[in-house]
Image (spheres, rainbow, N blue to C red):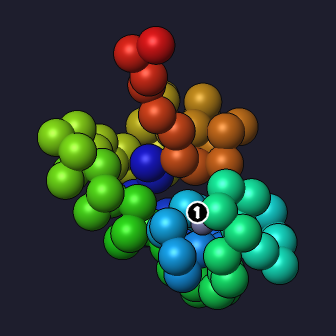
Amino acid sequence: MVENFQAAAYRCQNCGYISLAEQATCHFCGGPVELVSDVINTIVRRTLEAGNEVVVVQPNEHISGTLYTMGDIGALLRY
Ligand SMILES: [Zn+2]
């Protein structure tokens, strides 16, 4: 993710699912959702708890151009 990146998102109060798309109820469990003004701390915490790595890049680094087109945050997935 790009340094100092912030984003608001909707978080399910029942299962914790996070979505950038506005929704009245959770797509997975139907639970109530709340608007979280800065969800990045939650995303970073969950990533580290899962044993994964978080890489923070400076806005002027070459890779940040690619991240910018993806919304300043991205993930490398194994599968
Ligand atoms: Zn849910």
Residue shown at 59%/85% (left/top)? 37
User: 71 or 37, which is in the foreground?
Assistant: 37
Question: Is label 1 within 8 A of ligand 1 (CB to nearest ligand atom)?
Answer: no
Q: Position of residue 32 (x, y in %)?
A: 68, 83
Q: Position of residue 40 (x, y in %)?
A: 44, 67
Residue shown at 71%/37% (left/top)? 69
* Numbered circles on residues, count: 1
Q: Position of residue 49 (x, y in %)?
A: 19, 53
To which residue does mark 1 refer?
Answer: 18
Residue 68, by quadrant, is: top right
User: 12 or 61, which is in the foreground?
Assistant: 12
Residue 18, by quadrant, is: bottom right
Is residue 8 positioned above or below 1 on the image?
Answer: below
Query: Image check: 47 left or right of 4?
Result: left
Q: Is residue 19 visible?
A: no
Is residue 50 positioned above or below 79 on the image?
Answer: below
Amino acid type, residue under disc 1 in the picture: Ile
Q: Determine crowd level at label 1: few under 14, some 14-19, many 20+ residues with C-alpha closer than 10 A.
A: many
Is residue 47 positioned above or below 25 on the image?
Answer: above
Q: Is residue 59 visible?
A: yes
Q: Quadrant of ligand 1?
A: bottom right
Secondary structure type for disc 1: strand
User: 78 or 68, which is in the foreground?
Assistant: 78
Residue shown at 67%/39% (left/top)? 70
Query: Image check: 61 left or right of 74?
Result: left
Residue shown at 66%/76% (left/top)? 31
